Amino acid sequence: MKKRILLLCLFCMTLGFAYSQKIDSEITNMSKTVISTSGKKSLIKAENLKKAWTPSYIHVISISPKANLKALIRLEELLQKTPMLYNPENTLIICTDKYLELIKEAAAGYKLVQLPSLGSSESMIVEGKITPLTKEDNEPGYDFKFVEEKAL
């Protein structure tokens, strides 16, 4: 009888150990975003940007989490009044999740990527260019470079 109980305990401990070694998919699928800013240049490593970026994006608009309603109205007016300059095919919008729903309304049809604010400007809305890094950039660990051009 004691032998059976010991075997049962050993079997239960083996099962418990086996299940404790199972890899949790939520932990292993984490994506890491790294942004390093120096002056008007930001180096970026972000999976969501990698998935969204295409070479057709010649304008990148970064919206600061400090942006207020007036700045978002200005963004909407800018996008609506200059469709030849800014359109969904050539403009990528980067924002945090703070005002995501308002930004979706202001920039209807535009591709949005959630990242921390880019650029060093104290402005609420900044325009710049994002390009993939090359071997000549010599910045291992990063995928893209954002260069701030002007505050909007």
Image: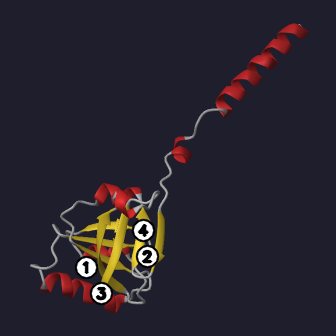
Rendered-image quadrant of the N terminus: top right
Of marks 3 and 2, the one in the foreground: 3
What residue lies at 81% left-to-right and 19% top-to-bottom? 9
Residue type highlighted by circle 1? Ala
In the picture, residue 52 is in which quadrant? bottom left
**Is residue 67 visible in the rendered structure shown here?**
yes
Q: What residue would you read off at disc 4?
A: 43
Instruction: Give how far apart the Cα atoms at labels 3 and 1 are.
Output: 20 Å
Q: CA distance from mark 3 to mark 2?
A: 22 Å
Q: Is residue 119 left or right of residue 72?
A: right
In the rendered structure, which disc, 3 or 2, sits on the residue that comes first in sequence? 2
Which sits earlier in the primary sequence, circle 1 or circle 2? 2
Mark carried by residue 106: 1
What residue is disc 3 on? 150
Crowding around mark 2 (Cα neighbors within 10 Å: few <14, some 14 to 19, many 20+) is: few
| Three-letter code, disc 4 | Leu
Q: Which residue is mark 2?
A: 98
Please state which of the two labelled residues, at mark 3 or mark 1, is closer to the viewer: 3
Question: Disc 1 versus disc 2: distance between alpha carbons?
Answer: 14 Å
Q: Does any portion of residue 96 appear in the rendered image?
A: no
Residue 49 coordinates in the image, percent (x, y): 35, 61
Tell me residue 23's x, y (percent). Answer: 58, 36
Q: Earlier in the sequence, mark 3 or mark 4?
A: 4
